[in-house]
Each structure stands twice: as structure tokens, then as C-alpha cells.
């Protein structure tokens, strides 16, 4: 879809011009993909403020670049960043913006030391800001990734039983996502059972599940570069009263967060809508991460939704809503959906449709 990428580059060029730079060097892989269409581990884009861009990649990706990025001039070089900076100098660029949030000090030093190198200035998050608002083609990829994620969890729920290890279930979940058509996984699947559920980003290990455990599964498929993100918590065997209590609390808070995810909502207020419910129940100290984040070409991207964050939601911004309560030594609950904020819809579009009722397996 070259026309989509050209339109994105045109918007980025407005930001470059507003900064007063002659051109920008785009080096973040998700940003390169967003502006060019090329998925590569070694690529960069030189984007002048008022002239067509240049894509650089090495020979491993050159044929894909010719196929997918025919509207961009292509430079085939192993050292893509120095090649583009040298090209910028030859073209008379005197001020070159760069992605300081991604560029290492070492790489910056190499570029600055090139003969005739332009003055390097930080670009800021111009491209990331553009990426927050998705077009319908991007949302369709997210929707498909979420459908695969939900289906894969359904495939695996029957395998959750006492004696199975966390790692076995994580592997089964990831295999199910691939079998269902995912290009890959969005992140390493989290399976946290029993007391490990008190660790929000627990790495699944050799612990064998036991009757009476709460089990939290955080999973996501990737389709066309776009990442799904969903968490569900289930109970093995009879759920204890304290487990049902915190589950219902988190479910209520999550529903409040989803309801508050509307165009014009302040991200801090959105966080407060869910966090306030957990705090009022006396569990505020056991929910210490943010309420959610944007999703797209990265599984964690802008906007970040938290009590110390600023910003306002606008139309067609996909975000997660994922409150949790984590009780050290006992276990925890997290419930997470990926959803899309929609103007005029009255409510966000929820992409992860797996039930949020407590499943007792």
C-alpha cells in the first residue's frame, strides 16, 4: 500500500519542517516500517522536509524493499545510517533530526564524526505521535490479531489442570496462536500460577499447577506487524472466597476503565476510573502499575495510561485496559482487553472478546 506510506511520510515531513530541520534520519524499526512498509532488522529512512525520501537497507532485504517500497529511492548498504548521513551531506542538508529515543551514544558519535556531517538535532517523537491514531487497515490487522489471540486461549484452556507446568501452557498457547495464523507472538506469553500470580510480569517456569490456584495468562498474537494484548485469570478447582473477592474487584475496575475510554478522556482520569475502585476497596497498594498503553507496531506504545501521565484520547486510538491486584505469597488477578477508542460510538470497540466471567476449570 505505497499510497498509505506516502501519506504518512507527508505528515511526518510537516513535523520535520516545523522543527526547522532540513531532513530526518528515521532509525527505529517500527517507525521505518510505518513510513516505508519494510519490515527489516537493518534499515533506515532519510526523510527530507520537502523532497522524497530515501530508504537504506542491506542486501538481505533489498529485494523485499524493491517489491514493497517502489516509491522510495533505495540505497543498498550494510551500514545504513552512515550511508544516509553521507547522502544527506552531499545533498546540502545542514540540520539533520534524529530519533534520540532510539539512537545510542555510540552510533550518534559515529555519525557526528563523518566528514561534512550535518548538525544533528533531536527529532522528538514525531513518528510515534502519528502512529497513535490508526487507520482502518491497521485496526483490521489488530482485530485479526485479537481474534487469533482469543481463539488460541480457547484452544488451550482445556489443558490447564493440576500437574501441568506454567512453561508447558505458555508453549501450548504460543503454538496455538501460530497454528491459528499468527505471524508470530506479540511478546513472551506470561503464565503465572498460584503465588506467582502476584508477580505482574512473571516468566513462566517449572512450577506445576495445583488445585485451588488462580492462573493468570497474558498473551498476544502478531499479524502484519500489529500486536494483540489480552490477559485473563482463571481458577483451577474451587475458588476460595478471597480469590472471588479480588477477581470481582478487578473485573469491576476493568469495566469502569473500559467505559471511561472515550474520545476526549484524559489518560490520568481514565487510570483513576479503575484505580479508584481498587483503592476504595483497600487494595490500592496492590495495584502499582499503570492501567494500560497503546498497541500497534509495538505491543507497548503511546499513549501510556497511568496516574502520572498526561494526554487525551482521540478517535481511532487502540489501547489496553488492564488493572490488577497482586497479593504477595498468595496470588493475583489481572484482566486486560485491547480496545479501540471511537468517536461518536458512545463506547470503545473491544477487540478481545473472550469472556471475563471467572472460569473455574
Image (cartoon, rainbow, N blue to C red):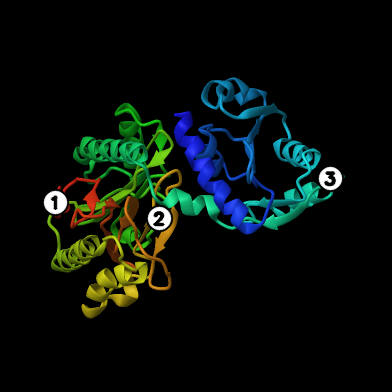
* Residue 202 badge: 2
Between 253 and 162, the residue placed more toward the observer is 253
Q: Is residue 113 left or right of residue 26?
A: right
Question: How far across and how far down the image is residue 218, in percent?
Answer: 33, 49
* Residue 360 badge: 1
Question: How far across and how far down the image is residue 33, in percent?
Answer: 52, 37
Q: Nearer the viewer, mark 1 or mark 3?
A: 3
Q: What element carries label 3?
A: loop
| Residue at mark 1 to residue at mark 2: CA–CA distance | 22 Å
In the image, is residue 209 above or below residue 52? below
Is residue 342 visible in this depiction of the protein?
Answer: yes
Picture mark count = 3
Q: Is residue 43 left or right of residue 117?
A: left
Q: Is mark 1 on a helix, strand or loop?
A: loop
In the image, is residue 5 above or below residue 354? above
Q: In which quarter of the image is residue 244?
A: bottom left
Q: Earlier in the sequence, mark 1 or mark 3?
A: 3
Q: Is residue 179 left or right of residue 235?
A: right
The residue at the point 35 percent across, 30 percent down is: 178
Between 21 and 214, the residue placed more toward the observer is 21
Q: Which residue lies furthest to the front in this view?
A: 50
User: Dot 3 corresponds to which residue?
Assistant: 114
Q: Nearer the viewer, mark 3 or mark 2?
A: 3
Amino acid at each position: 500500500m505505497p499510497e498509505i506510506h506516502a501519506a504518512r511520510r507527508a505528515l511526518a515531513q510537516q513535523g520535520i519542517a516545523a522543527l526547522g530541520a532540513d531532513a530526518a534520519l528515521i532509525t527505529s524499526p517500527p517507525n521505518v516500517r510505518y513510513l516505508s512498509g519494510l519490515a527489516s532488522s537493518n534499515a533506515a529512512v532519510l526523510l527530507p522536509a520537502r523532497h522524497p525520501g530515501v530508504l537504506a537497507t542491506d542486501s538481505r532485504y533489498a529485494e523485499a524493499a524493491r517489491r514493497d517500497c517502489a516509491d522510495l529511492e533505495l540505497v543498498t548498504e550494510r551500514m545504513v545510517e552512515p550511508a544516509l548521513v553521507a547522502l544527506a551531506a552531499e545533498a546540502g542538508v545542514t540540520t539533520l533530526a534524529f530519533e534520540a529515543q532510539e539512537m545510542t551514544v555510540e552510533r550518534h558519535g559515529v555519525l557526528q564524526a563523518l566528514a561534512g556531517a550535518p548538525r544533528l538535532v533531536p527529532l522528538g517523537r514525531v513518528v510515534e505521535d502519528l502512529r497513535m491514531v490508526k487507520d482502518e487497515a491497521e485496526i483490521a490487522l489488530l482485530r485479526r490479531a485479537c481474534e487469533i489471540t482469543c481463539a488460541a486461549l480457547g484452544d488451550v484452556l482445556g489443558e490447564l489442570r493440576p500437574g501441568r507446568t506454567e512453561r508447558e501452557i505458555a508453549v501450548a498457547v504460543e503454538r496455538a496462536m501460530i497454528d491459528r495464523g499468527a505471524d508470530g507472538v506479540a511478546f513472551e506469553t506470561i503464565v503465572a500460577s498460584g503465588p506467582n500470580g502476584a508477580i505482574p510480569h512473571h516468566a513462566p517456569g517449572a512450577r506445576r499447577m495445583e488445585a485451588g490456584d488462580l492462573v493468570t495468562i497474558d498473551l498476544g498474537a502478531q499479524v502484519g506487524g500489529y500486536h494483540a494484548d489480552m490477559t485473563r485469570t482463571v481458577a483451577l478447582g474451587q475458588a476460595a472466597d478471597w480469590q472471588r473477592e479480588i477477581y470481582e474487584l478487578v473485573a469491576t475496575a476493568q469495566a469502569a476503565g473500559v467505559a471511561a475510554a472515550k474520545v476526549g478522556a484524559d489518560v490520568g482520569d481514565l487510570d483513576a476510573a479503575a484505580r479508584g475502585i481498587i483503592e476504595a476497596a483497600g487494595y490500592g497498594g496492590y495495584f502499582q502499575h499503570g492501567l494500560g498503553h497503546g498497541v500497534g507496531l509495538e505491543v507497548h506504545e503511546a499513549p501510556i495510561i497511568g496516574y502520572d501521565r498526561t494526554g487525551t484520547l482521540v478517535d481511532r486510538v487502540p489501547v489496553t485496559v488492564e488493572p490488577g491486584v497482586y497479593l504477595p505469597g498468595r496470588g493475583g488477578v489481572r484482566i486486560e482487553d485491547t480496545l479501540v477508542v471511537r468517536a461518536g460510538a458512545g463506547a470503545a470497540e473491544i477487540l478481545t472478546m473472550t469472556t471475563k466471567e471467572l472460569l473455574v476449570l
